[in-house]
Amino acid sequence: MASYYYLIASLPELSADGDMPITYSEFLSCCQSNVSDSDYELLKDLTLSSTEGPLVKEWSEFYGMLSKELNYQRSMNLGKSYSSAYDKDGFIAQVVGSALAAKNPLEAERILLEYEFENLDSLVGLHMFDDYVLFGYAIKLKLLERLNSFEQTKGKAEFRSLFDGIQQRVYSL
């Protein structure tokens, strides 16, 4: 297990309710000369659904359960059956229910993001300045990157367009 004292201490703090202080490509630039080649390759190829790397397997199990619960509750809300079997976690179900009850999709994403950050902090635990912390940071950065990809004005325009189309169909009946 490698130690990354300087690298981790030099990275800006990430917060679920804050801005993205560093891009993923800037993060990779910081890592390139400070981590092992194998860790760098894993970081370079990291996605939210990756399964390889320190901490990543544990994250993947959690993220899979969260995704399945989201799919299950969305299916139930639409009155459809959900045929995939999965291990149901009561707390995950409660968080997903809160997110789906949010007044808008961005608020729902923020609820999920806060929970994902809490889970990552729990997975990192008492690790300090090692690859667990580094990969936890990378996953948090990927989550913030995903959240920042949502553009509220574009989303409202798309919603308005879809809603107008539905209204026209209803009025034509």
Image (cartoon, rainbow, N blue to C red):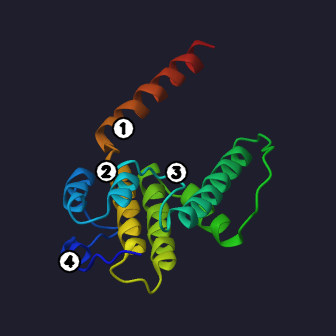
Query: Which residue lies at the image location 61% right of the left edge and 53% below the top edge?
Result: 67
Question: Farthest residue in the top direction?
Answer: 172
Amino acid type of the residue tagged 3 in the rendering: Ser
Picture quarter with the C terminus: top right
Q: 92 and 154: which one is in front? A: 92
Residue wearing tag 1: 156
Residue wearing tag 4: 6
Badge 1 element:
helix
Q: 81 and 46: which one is in front? A: 46
Cα–Cα gap, marks 2 and 4:
27 Å
Residue 76 versus residue 19 in the image, above or below: above
Task: Say which mark, if any, is on residue 148.
Answer: 2
Picture quarter with the N terminus: bottom left
Residue wearing tag 3: 49
| Labels 2, 3: front one | 3
Cα–Cα gap, marks 2 and 1:
15 Å
| Labels 3, 1: front one | 3
Amino acid type of the residue tagged 4 in the rendering: Tyr
Residue 13 versus residue 86 in the image, above or below: below
Cα–Cα gap, marks 4 and 3:
28 Å
Residue 95: image x %, image y %?
A: 59, 66
Question: Farthest residue in the front direction?
Answer: 37
How many neighbours does mark 1 have within 10 angstroms: few (below 14), some (14-19), or many (20 or more)?
A: few
Badge 4 element:
helix
Q: Are marks 4 and 1 in contact (CB under 8 Å)?
A: no
Residue 19 visible in the displayed image: yes
Badge 3 element:
loop
Query: Which residue lies at the image location 48% right of the left edge and 57% below the top edge?
Result: 108
Q: Quadrant of residue 127?
A: bottom left
